Amino acid sequence: MNIVLLGAPGAGKGTQAAFIKERYGLAHISTGDIFRANIKGGTPIGKVAKSYIDAGKLVPDEVTCELVKDRLLNGELGAGFMLDGFPRNIFQAKELDTFAKVDLCVNIDVDKSLLMDRICGRRMCSCGATYHVSTLDGATTCAKCGKPLYRRDDDNPETVEARLNTYAAQTAPLVDYYAAQGKLCTVNGGAGSPEQVFAAIAAELDKYVK
Ligand code: AMP
């Protein structure tokens, strides 16, 4: 089973990806994570990506598509793949269709009013855990592994505004793109706990794995 996870910044794609990976054994491919690793490592791709990411804009399609194509054609895939953060516009979606088969697009729908608060209050750990300041009670280290928590460079109000605008203009049209192919399922990511959102996603995915 090959899926695309769609949703605005702060919709909970990363959190749901971890649940999905554990239950269904899909390879989790996050273009944002790949870019951040490249920036940290000071690679040529990281150098190109940084200015776009800092501005809340999309990294150029030719760089991004090449990265994903290479990962899908040459990397380990387990029971299939789960793309998180790709495709991000119609061009990328059409490119993806030339080198891989998408079975389902899971669209995590969250009201815009919730997204800004979720992202600006988000704190990360390098182990992959994610928190919101409102639930940390002042803690500055990860409850799972004890490492210090940090805020992503692009999780500041100005960049978040730009990222949400980029999403609305370039990524949201993918909802219609996958609906037209009969591959779209939408879950409400704004109500209920992460576990409840996952239950709604799992109900859809189970139709494909059975
Ligand atoms: P994310 O971690 O998915 O929120 O991505 C962080 C940033 O990485 C985005 O704001 C973009 O600048 C860049 N990025 C991630 N995925 C893509 C993509 N598919 N196309 C272009 N830029 C991307």
Image (spheres, rainbow, N blue to C red):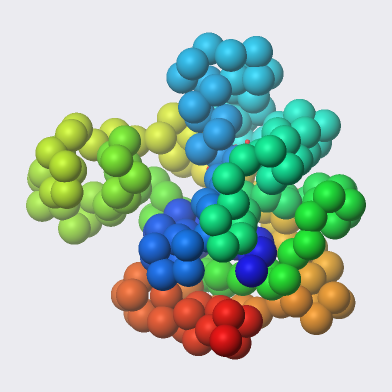
Q: Is residue 180 left or right of residue 43?
A: right
Residue 168 percent across, percent down from the top left: 70, 57
In the rendered image, the vertical position of residue 40 relative to residue 31, given as above or below: above
Place of residue 166 in the rendered image (x, y in percent of width and height, measured from the top left): 69, 47
Residue 195 appears in which quarter of the rendering? bottom left
Residue at 42 percent across and 75 percent down: it is 198
Q: Is residue 204 visible?
A: no
Q: Nearer the viewer, residue 129 or 169?
A: 129
- The image shows residue 156, relative to residue 102, as above or below, that is above
> Please, is residue 20 above or below residue 161 in the view?
below
Please name the residue shown 19% across and 32% down the image.
Answer: 148
- Give residue 60's position: percent from left, percent from top: 77, 31
Q: Position of residue 64 (x, y in %)?
A: 73, 35
Q: Residue at x 75, y 76 (%)?
A: 183
Which residue does the image show at 56% across and 62% down from the upper left?
79
- Is 127 positioned to the left or the right of 4 in the image? left
Q: In the figure, is residue 83 to the left or right of 33?
A: right
**Quadrant of the picture in which ligand 1 is shown:** top right
Name the quadrant containing residue 178.
bottom right
In the image, 95 versus 149, the foreground residue is 95
Quadrant occupied by the C terminus: bottom right
Would residue 203 be seen by someone viewing this image from the given angle? yes
Quadrant of the drawing holding the N terminus: bottom right
Left or right side of 170 for 43: left
Q: How many marks?
A: 0
